[in-house]
Image: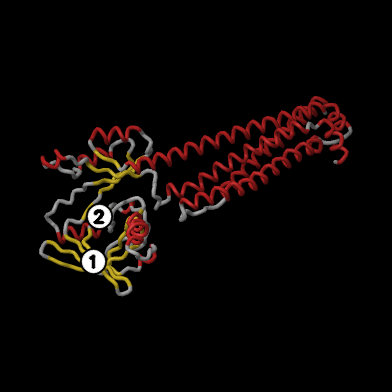
Amino acid sequence: MKLVWKLLRQHISIGQLAGFFFANLLGMLIVLLSLQFYQDVKPAFSQEDSFIKNDYLIVSKSISMVGSLTGSSSTFKEAEIDDIAAQPFTSAVGKFTATQYHVAAAFGVSGMGFSSDLFFESVPTQFVDVKSDDWHFNEAEGIVPIVLPRSYLALYNFGYAPSQSLPKITEDVVGMVEMVIVMRGNGQEQSVRGRVVGFSNRLNTILAPEDFINWSNQKFAPNEDASPTRLIVQVNNPADENIMKYFGDQGYEIAEDKLDAGKTMFFLRIVSIIIMAIGLLISALSFYILMLSIYLLVQKNTQKLQNLLLIGYSPARVSLPYQLLTIGMNAVVLVLSLVALVFVRNYYLDMLWSVFPEMDSGTIMPAILLGLILFVVVSLINVFAVRNKVMAIWKNKE
């Protein structure tokens, strides 16, 4: 083996192999980094409680002075809801159902308490971005799970509390608050207990389970119109220009921040795909450089290879030095790419955590798996290409 390697390495071009090495390293790093960055950033944009969940829009009817004077309804009729659901950009439509009776709530923490009038709304469970096993209402238990907007807590902690010299509170503390909900209407009054089970970034309203809203409206406001004034619409592609055109033509209003956030997530995907494609292109070009270098090296050593084959060396044994060379370089590229990825990832995660302190850091396993797949595929192609080239020389010798 040592003799074979000494004979074959004389015509190895260090410059060509170095060009392949650094090009492949750059390409591999770009591919792995684009995938890992997308995986790390995605939770901040698309996790269930993300403040910019990418594909949900809140739709309402425009309220104008003329409409209020003429008595135009701001509620959605079933035909209008069906028309929205039939649009090609729509995946699903949910209704906001509000309480139609008087609601008051008394709160207490550590012996201190206060009361306030409230309202509740509900949406179908599939649109609620807080997952809880308690998200249901049972009249016999008499406990109403509640989801609050996370913006309410931020408003208290960073606005009201400092101005009143009050302590800031956490989500866990809010979950411990004792709450009594008093419902009045239709000549009846009933009290139930309430418990905050989570905070929503998607929905800026006080949520209660749909079965509770339906039950309480039927009991305390059976004759009131519970038609929805807002809808939540899940769309396929928030960047679709037909969304704004359709809702504008119908006179509907959309929460612009939700639409812009959806576009942000959509373009994040597109940019990640483009960057990954560029990395794959660089890797493909570096692979081409390697194959060209190996082919030229084999071509220069054709006479030596023929002599080795004539004196009894097998094609597999003659091919082995070239195959080990390519596999070794690919392995070094993979290791260095992963090391560089870890350093770069630690750098940008610090910046992401400063903006999204609750963001999950995720795992590096997707990038490792992709790197291993690329290593195996490229190495196998190199091995078979070298073997085929040597076999061609073997056949010509015969």
Relative height, residue 330 to residue 198 (above, below) = above
Query: Mark 2 belongs to which amino acid?
Result: Glu
Q: Is residue 352 left or right of residue 147?
A: right
Residue depicted at x 27% and y 58% = 208
Find residue 84 and report its horizontal and vertical position in percent.
Answer: 26, 39
Relative height, residue 264 to residue 289 (above, below) = below
Quarter of the image where one finds residue 64: top left
Upstream in the sequence, badge 2 or badge 1?
Answer: 1
Is disc 2 placed on a helix, strand or loop? strand
Count of marks, rendered view: 2
Distance Cα–Cα, label 2 vs label 1: 19 Å
Find residue 324 and report its horizontal and vertical position in percent.
Answer: 76, 40
Residue at the extreme top: 396
Residue 121 image label: 2
Question: Tag 1: Cα neighbours inside 10 Å, few (<14), some, or many (≥20)?
Answer: few
Are the residues flagged by discs 2 and 1 in contact, CB closer than 8 Å? Answer: no
Residue depicted at x 43% and y 50% = 47
Say which residue label 1 marks.
115
Residue depicted at x 61% and y 43% = 373
Q: Is residue 303 left or right of residue 199?
A: right
